[in-house]
Image (cartoon, rainbow, N blue to C red):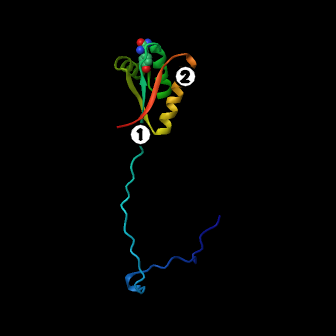
Amino acid sequence: MATKSPSQPTAPKLTPADGDGGASVVLERLTQKVQPPQMYQVVMLNDDYTPMEFVVFVIQEFFNKDRETATQIMLKIHLDGKGICGVYSRDVAATKVDQVMDAAHKAGHPLQCVSEPVE
Ligand code: TYC
């Protein structure tokens, strides 16, 4: 394993007392403004044909909810027309939408879900 030689040169440390003939440049300190990433909610839509049991299964399977929570979410969608299944980063939300739509299509159900930015 290579170790750092103790005699390696280091950048000279200038202090005001060193005197640099007025060549100093003071860089303005920039305040860092890092925003948290935009999050996306996966919203499932009601329809008249997809069986309730299939919706509960999908919510359990792709949104990692237990059966009781999945049933509550499904009933909310059934009654209100739509409901949030989960909130994720953009790519993960898009993947969830694809997984749900793919499973619904393969099972022959018209279940729809979309991803939308939170707030
Ligand atoms: N409304 C459907 C029914 O009565 C059930 C359902 C719930 C369908 C939620 C879609 O996202 C949905 N069979």
Q: Position of residue 21 (x, y in %)?
A: 42, 87
Q: Residues within 10 Å of mark 1 (few under 14, many from 20)?
A: some
Q: Label 1 is placed on what type of residue? A: Met
Dot 1 falls on a residue whose secondary structure is: loop
Q: Residue at x 37, y 55 (%)?
A: 33
Question: Residue 24 is drawn in which quadrant?
Answer: bottom left
Circle 1 residue? 39
- The quadrant in which the C terminus is found is top left
- Seen in the image, is 117 located left or right of residue 62? left
Earlier in the chain: of badge 1 and badge 2, it is 1
- The quadrant in which the N terminus is found is bottom right
Q: Is 100 above or below relative to 6? A: above
Q: Write down which quadrant ligand 1 falls in.
A: top left
> In this figure, what is the number of numbered marks?
2
Q: Position of residue 56 (x, y in %)?
A: 45, 19
Q: Position of residue 111 (x, y in %)?
A: 48, 20
Q: Position of residue 102 (x, y in %)?
A: 55, 24
Q: Residue at x 53, y 29 (%)?
A: 98
Q: Label 2 is placed on what type of residue? A: Ala
Circle 2 residue? 103
Q: CA distance from mark 1 to mark 2?
A: 24 Å
Q: Residues within 10 Å of mark 2 (few under 14, many from 20)?
A: some
